Amino acid sequence: MQLDSAPRPAPVRARLRAAACLLLASSIPGARAAAAATTQFDASGLLYGELDRAKVVEPTLRVMRLLDNGQSFSAGLVLDAITGASPSGAMPTGRAMTTTSASGTVTNHAPGEIPTSPFSDFRGALELGWHQPLGGIVATDLVTHYSREKDYQSIGGTAALSLDLMQRLTSVTVGGGYDYDNVFPVNGVPVGLSPVVAGTGGPPDEGPTNASAVTAAAATGGTSAAVKQVPSAVVGVSRILTRRWMVSLNASRIVQRGYLTEPYKIVSVIDPDSGTTVGSITEQRPTTRDRRDLLANSVYHFGTGVFYSSYRYYWDDWGVRSHTIDLKYRRDLAEETFFQPHVRLYAQTAADFFRFGVVQGEPLPTYASSDYRLGPLRSVTLGGTYGFHVPDYPGELTVRAEYILQWGDGHPSDAVGVQRTLDLMPPLHIATVMVGYTRTF
Amino acid sequence: MKAPAVRDSGAPSLRRVDDYFVGTFMAMASPCELLLDTDDWDDARAALERVHGEAARIEATFSRYLDGNVVHRINHSAGRPVEVDAETASLIDYAATCWEASGGLFDITSGALRRVWKFDGGDRVPSHEALAATLRNVGWHRVTWHSPVLTLPAGMEIDLGGIGKEYAVDRAASLVAAGTRAPFLVNFGGDLFASGARRGGATWSVGIDDPEHTGAAALYRIDFDRGGLATSGDARRYVMWQGRRLGHILDPRTGWPVSGAPRSITVLATTCVEAGTLSTLAYLQGAAARDFLDGQGVRFWIL
Amino acid sequence: MMTRSRVLWLLLLTLLAPLVGGCAATSVKPWDRDLLAQKSMRFVPLPMESAIDQHIYFSKEGSMGGQEAGGGGCGCN
């Protein structure tokens, strides 16, 4: 083509304008609206270990897909593999004991050691969620879940409605849920407070692999499965107070109805003079439990980091009341990097029917449980999370290590005989390590 | 152009100035900003994310400094045909049209000349032989382009830097316009686009810096309500030759910087791409820049 | 004499009132929401961690409840 050395100032603009319009009008496949991240993938792995007791491995996967109209769908899968030993509810007797299980395993307990029994279980849970904005300030969330383990199945769902008021400074959420659970212990549902015949001397073992001794005691009961229904409701208000500070207050209520007893746990029958264990009976808990709590949350941005604090007061009609204080400080180090130390303090009162064994000869109470989780419990958690990302690789990683110490008032005033010399709720040491990965596409 | 104040990290930040929002970030080695005339913080945030995302995307896709993208593939194709995606094809189409309409002045293969020119304010100029050798690797007429396949002879390279930033401005602007009705202005290091008059009918007010004294008060104030604005000039990169300052824009036919061009040419056109091309073409006319722009029916400012 | 429940509900309402009401004077202007936009400014910034924690604590303790509705879905509480 001809190239002039001194191009005439022809109205080249018209051509350029047309060419530019053509360029900008051309569709660009693959270019999405920036930062409208449409898919989020989360994965985490938990390693949990109690000293001399249970160990858990728990991987979790979650995928969420966000659509342009604000709708989102999510699916999550949690798998739990638990092995180890769990306290059976039996009291320590102050002497070394040997127990054998129905399968022939021999366990030796040191004097004063809380009797436990081995168990293993595997649980899988699937959860599906849907979030739908309805107009500018209202949104709904629906979640449904299904979970299954060897002797337990749960199907349920929750629905929540949230409203953003005052230019999104205040948000109100109302939610409700319903769970329908089936309990089918190995060998059937035991009759409560009935004697448990030991396998071969000493307290019987418990747990799905060794449950025959406990649940066989209830063979005359004839029930193989039981039902538990759990409606729940929550109301919450959150408010942005200043540029740095937001707070929220939640109140929730959960009412459990049906079979609420632990089928494999026992209560020791104690000799009134010596305090040693002379037998065992199965547990019995009420068939309803009305549980309520108030939760106050605060998030405050200091500039270099964010301080999270929460306080929860819980109470129920079994007599359990608890206070929980949870504090975290997320210190931002660099872009997408942070360190977050964590402290949690917990204290609960015992359930009304919690007892360290029943005394032989005394009339049986209506309800009884020696499950330490319903006892006078305290716990402290100390831990930290480190969040980072690997340069040039997508996604963010978090690594968390925590130490939990759980103990209780193991010296009740009505301890009998040898029980006075023992700590009936010795400390439990727990360590957890968790690794998490999040990636947005 | 007054450089907007930005944080060092690439992440965008948003703040309120008077009665509008200013979002800022760094991209394409330039301070970038979005001015959005609204009171809705969420709208401003969303628009800023779109602008930042699009700037980052275009830089990643078309920067000749990054490995692995389509420009890198083309420049390392060693004479083999390269099939490009639809967006790259449309940019190459535009560049080809500009080459033809400008009589060969606007040429995206002229980047090879930077191998022999160093615009660092010193006085080194390439030898006649070096320049002649390099010129053999310059010239869009040597390229075979049948959309979407581009065949670049070995030794040649393309550089979309001449239209990349302006294109990014227009693309970012169309994304903002798709998400909000508020009037806005997108400014990537001096190449900008405004969508319309501000609330209340006021125009956008843009200052053009004295290229000699950046940081001093603006020399020109340009008031406009819609369109693309781009500036060509020799402000920072130049070479001294025989006592004369030569800008960094090279005439691909001779291999030498354009002589006699004004220090700074700013053009206002319908889109930023169009304004950028016109200002570059005007600059390439050298002393005839003003005459060139007079006949084009655009507003322009020459220093 | 008020029961414990009544006292607590009254406390809840007292705390709620300023949250839902609120004065225009302390209102946060839209352009001051820069910090609030950050990912860390959420009540639950790390939801996966939080869900795992909830599970750990309600299976090792006697309490449950908190952020969301739901019964737990397992035999451990």
Image (cartoon, coloured by chain):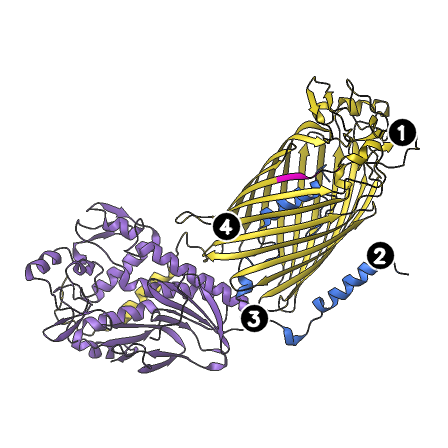
Question: Mark 1 vs mark 4: same chain?
Answer: yes
As drawn, the chain in yellow is: A
Residue A338 visible, this angle: yes
Q: Give the number of marks.
A: 4
What's the chain of the residue with tag 2? C
Amino acid type of the residue tagged 3 in the rendering: Pro
As drawn, the chain in blue is: C
Which residues, given as a range, are shown in magenta? A425-430
The residue carrying mark 3 is: C30
Residue beneath the point at 50% across and 57% down: A332
The residue carrying mark 2 is: C4
Question: Mark 3 vs mark 4: same chain?
Answer: no
- Mark nearest the camera among 1 and 4 is 1
What's the chain of the residue with tag 1? A
Distance from Cα at disc 4 to Cα at disc 2: 42 Å
Which residue is more in the foreground, B2 or A92? A92
The residue carrying mark 1 is: A360
Relative placement, left or right, of A47 versus B51 is right
Q: Classify mark 4: helix, strand or loop.
A: strand
Which residue is more in the foreground, B2 or C12? C12
User: Residue A418 appears in which quarter of the rendering?
Assistant: top right
The residue carrying mark 4 is: A387
Q: Classify mark 2: helix, strand or loop.
A: helix
Seen from this angle, which residue lies furthest front? A421
The picture's colour for chain B is purple
Relative placement, left or right, of A404 versus C33 is right
Q: Residue B277: where, in percent of width, then height?
A: 27, 68
**In the rendered image, the vertical position of residue A32 relative to residue B290, given as above or below:** above
Q: Earlier in the sequence, mark 1 or mark 4?
A: 1
- Mark nearest the camera among 1 and 2 is 1
Residue B149 visible, this angle: no
